[in-house]
Amino acid sequence: MIKLLNKIFNRSNKKKDLVENRPTELQISITCLLVRAASIDDDFAILEEEKIEELVKKYFNLTGDDMVNVMKEAKVRESNAVDLYSFTKVIQKNLNQEERKIIIEMMWEIVAVDENFDPYENNLVWRTAELIGVSTRDRMNLKSKVIKNL
C-alpha cells in the first residue's frame, strides 16, 4: 500500500515539475520576435543569441535551464511561423502599453548588436510595433535611445 501511494505521489510530482519548467506563451512569443529580429538578415550570430538570452532572462527573471527551454521552443515556433500575429496577439493580450514599449526596445537592442540596421530589421520592428499598438513616435524614440547607448 505504501509503495502504491509513493508511486502515485512521485508520478504527480514529476508531472508538476514538467509543467513548472514549461515556458509560458508570453515568454515564447517575446523570444520568437527577438529570434526573428536576429535572424531576419540571414545572419543569426552568437552575439545576437547571447543578447536574446540576456534580455529574456532579465525580463522574466529566468534561470539558465529555464532559458534553454524557452529558447529551444521559440526557435522551433519561429521557424514554423508564417506571420507575426500569433506572437503579437499574445503580447497585445498580456502586456500593457509600457511593457509593450519594453518589447520594442528589446527588439531594437537585438537589431543593434551588429551595429547594422538592415532595412528588413527596421521593417520587422515597425510591423511588430504596429501590431502591438506602439506608436511610430515611441518606436523611433526607443530606437534613438538604443543607438545612444551603443
Image (cartoon, rainbow, N blue to C red):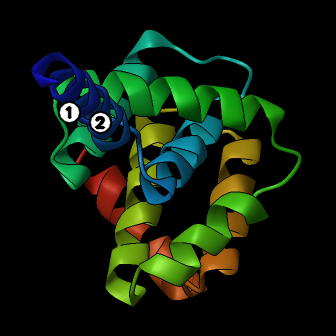
Residue at the extreme top of the image, as rendered: 46
Q: CA distance from mark 1 to mark 2?
A: 5 Å
> Measuring 46% from the left and 59% from the top, which residue is drawn there?
26
- Displayed quadrant of residue 75: top right
Quadrant occupied by the C terminus: top left
Q: Quadrant of residue 96?
A: bottom left
State the residue position of label 2: 12
Q: Looking at the image, can residue 40 be seen?
A: no
Q: Are marks 1 and 2 in contact (CB under 8 Å)?
A: yes
Amino acid on which the number 2 mark rests in the picture: Ser
Q: Work out whether residue 26 or residue 150 is closer to the camera in this orientation and state it.
A: 26
The kind of residue tagged 1 is: Phe
| Front residue of 82 and 11 | 11
According to the picture, the residue beneath numbered tag 1 turns out to be 9
- Give the x, y percent position of residue 69: 40, 26
Between 150 and 61, the one lying in front of the other is 61
Residue 12: percent from the left, percent from the top? 29, 36
Q: Quadrant of residue 66?
A: top left
- Few, some or many C-alpha atoms within 10 Å of disc 2 (few <14, some 14-19, many ≥20)? few
- The extreme left residue here reads 2
Badge 1 marks a residue whose secondary structure is helix
Q: Which residue is painted at 59% across and 48% down in the image?
A: 33
Q: Residues within 10 Å of mark 1 (few under 14, many from 20)?
A: few
**147 vs 40: above or below:** below
Residue 45: horizontal and vertical position, in percent?
Answer: 51, 14
Is 33 left or right of 42, judged from the image as shown? left
Is 91 or 113 nearer to us in this picture? 91
